[in-house]
Image: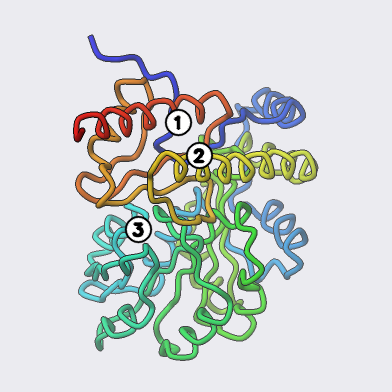
Amino acid sequence: MGIPVLHRLALNESPYPPLPSVREAMQRAVAEAHRYPQFHPDDLTELIAAWCGVTSDNVAVGSGSVGVALQVLRAVARPGDAVVHAWRTFDAYPLLAAMVDARPVPVPLSPDGHQDLDALLAAFDDRTRVVVLCNPHNPSGSLVTADALSAFLRQVPRHVTVLLDEAYLEFARDPGLPDSPALVDAHPNVLVLRTFSKAYGLAALRVGYGLGAPDLVARIRRQQLPFGVNAVATAAVKASLRAESELRLRVDTVVAERERLRRELVSIGWCVRPGHANSVWLAAPDPVDAGAAALTEAGIEARHYPGEGLRLTVGDRNANDTVLTALAGLRAHRSASRT
């Protein structure tokens, strides 16, 4: 029998369940589960547009941000076209490219875990139709600043769609964070992806959205699955937006724990660079494989990339303390074995 999992820190989920007001809204929606949701999520689209300060023509809603990303690829890519992305990155992107018979083109991260913007541009060819940027990056948590992103976008041909994945935007506190709605106004080939899975704690309900120019959004919406956003998810999103101030406090707590976790890991000998998501990234040459084994032994489920890195979702304080105990024990054991 395997070691029981005490803390799930592998999928960058929120450590908190939905707020009571959100659960109540979900329960009310469940009572109407015998009714279909809207054919297309028009009400939710209008609500998100008003919340973001844009028009509804700028918003596409789908089954998580990954669902919107698939709609984008179906809208703009053809079999044999190229989808350029950093690697590592969110594992779904090469899978989505394969689903539309496109060709994924992985570009290595820089040694410090950043997306290499010059190398991404150099990977373009005459079949490139999409380039993906995760900002903050998954899994390293690094950030592309506003100035760097603007310079990059000026060099991307207009026929190439830029998927700017901002799934972790709410956890970023850097003053150099890009103003994405302004970028959409300036670059009609940019589609900003966002989600209610992470900061809003609705991962199981699968609601994401994209912000883009009306022409691009119209093409994406033509790929939208009818009845594709269920009524319980819609109710949960609406209630979450009403409770945004409460949710912001939760996000602030996760950010504070992220910084504490990083400081404590550095103090026990791990090299952990500053990150901007709801996770910390441990990278080789630190002993990430041994670290993964120590975490498993302690009942912690983490995202392990053998020989490369270890992504740890920021959990609640108890989960994070368990992480620190396991990884401190590993460091102490390795230090003792060298003496």
In this rendering, would 79 be left or right of 158? Answer: left
Q: How many marks?
A: 3
Q: Quadrant of the C terminus?
A: top left
Report x, y in % for residue 223. 45, 62
Report x, y in % for residue 230. 57, 39
Q: Spatial distance from mark 3 to mark 2, Cα to Cα?
A: 26 Å
Q: Is residue 180 visible?
A: no
Q: Secondary structure at mark 2?
A: helix
Identified at 38% across, 51% down, the residue is: 271
Q: Secondary structure at mark 1?
A: helix
Q: Which mark is residue 264?
A: 2
The amino acid sitting under disc 2 is Glu
Give neighbour class at mark 2: few <14, some 14-19, many 20+ (Cα, 10 Å): some
- Which one is in front in this view, the residue at disc 3 or the one at disc 2? 2
The amino acid sitting under disc 1 is Leu
Give neighbour class at mark 3: few <14, some 14-19, many 20+ (Cα, 10 Å): many
In this rendering, would 55 be left or right of 304? Answer: right
Query: Foreground residue, 165 or 58?
Result: 165
Disc with the residue nearer the chain's start (2 vs 1)? 2
Residue under numbered circle 3: 89
User: Does the CB distance between marks 2 and 1 fall below 8 Å?
Assistant: yes
Q: Secondary structure at mark 3?
A: loop
Disc with the residue nearer the chain's start (3 vs 1)? 3
Residue under numbered circle 1: 324
The amino acid sitting under disc 3 is Thr
Report x, y in % for residue 322. 46, 24
Disc with the residue nearer the chain's start (3 vs 2)? 3
Q: Quadrant of the N terminus?
A: top left
Up the image or down, 139 lies above or below 192; here it is above
